[in-house]
Image (cartoon, rainbow, N blue to C red):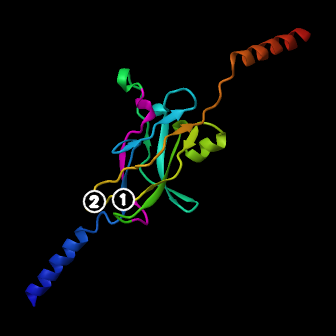
Amino acid sequence: MKKLLIALAVALVTAASYGQGTTGAVVLGNLGGGVNAPVMLGDTGHGPGPDYSAQLFLQSGTTLTPLTPPTTFRPAGVGAQAIADRYLVTVPIDVIPGTTPGGSASFVLRAWKTSLGTFDAAKASGANFGESAPVTVASLGGGTLPQANLVGLAGFTVLTTPEPSILALGVLGASALLLRRRK
């Protein structure tokens, strides 16, 4: 009987140790592993760079749940690495609530200017934010499965605050001079 209790205790401890990794997992990244989804900053031809944050959101119907950790974009490089600022610093997301390893899930990638605080704050300001179209990962990683990549993720553009044109600044300056001259 004593041996049976010891064997049962060992079995329970072993089962509890395999309790880790019971949710799906994915790699938050937009380059590599079958993914090439550059994020562009307006029509500049450049990426957002390290001044911007990005976060993956789990989509369930119309509800978006933020997944941690968020990340940033890489700094621009030189030569062949000049486009690096279009791509994220890759991070694994080990816990995706309500999912299982091998299951499927839909995600949205959002990016915003870090100094604005959150994606919602950036969106409220009317600029310096962007988001991808939803992407469904057919087989999540986790447990004994390797991390899944965001295969099918499409690149997107971050809306920026438009710079005033030189002509608009000239008209504004001329108007200010005329108003001052009238006084």
- Identify the magenta region: 83-99
In which quarter of the view is residue 173 placed? Answer: top right
Q: Does residue 111 show up magenta in the picture?
A: no
The residue drawn where x is 65% and y is 28% is: 162
Up/down of 49 relative to 156, above or below: above
- Pick the residue in front: 69 or 61: 61
Between 116 and 75, the residue placed more toward the observer is: 75
Q: Residues within 10 Å of mark 1 (few under 14, many from 20)?
A: many
Residue 74 image point, x, y percent: 41, 33
Could you say which quadrant of the image residue 166 lies in?
A: top right
Asked if residue 28 can be seen in this view, the reply is yes
Q: Position of residue 27 (x, y in %)?
A: 36, 49
Q: Position of residue 72 (x, y in %)?
A: 44, 39
Q: Mark 1 is on which residue type?
A: Leu
Specify whether residue 94 is painted magenta: yes
User: Closest to the observer: 38 or 3?
Assistant: 38
Q: Inspect the image, locate mark 2, and give the three-letter code of the amino acid beneath it.
A: Leu
Is 143 left or right of 68, judged from the image as shown? left
* 138 up-or-down from 86: above or below: below
Q: CA distance from mark 2 to mark 1?
A: 8 Å
Q: Which residue is mark 1?
A: 140
Residue 44 percent location from the top left of the image: 55, 26
To which residue does mark 2 refer? 145
Residue sitting at 80 percent across and 12 percent down?
174
For label 2, the crowd category at 10 Å Cα-Cα, with few meaning under 14, some 14 to 19 and many 20 or more, is some
The answer to whether residue 145 is left or right of residue 52 is: left
Q: Hey, which residue is sitting farthest right in the picture?
A: 182
Q: Residue furthest bottom?
A: 1
Left or right: 43 in relation to 172: left
Q: Secondary structure at mark 2?
A: loop
Q: Are the residues flagged by discs 2 and 1 in contact, CB closer than 8 Å?
A: yes
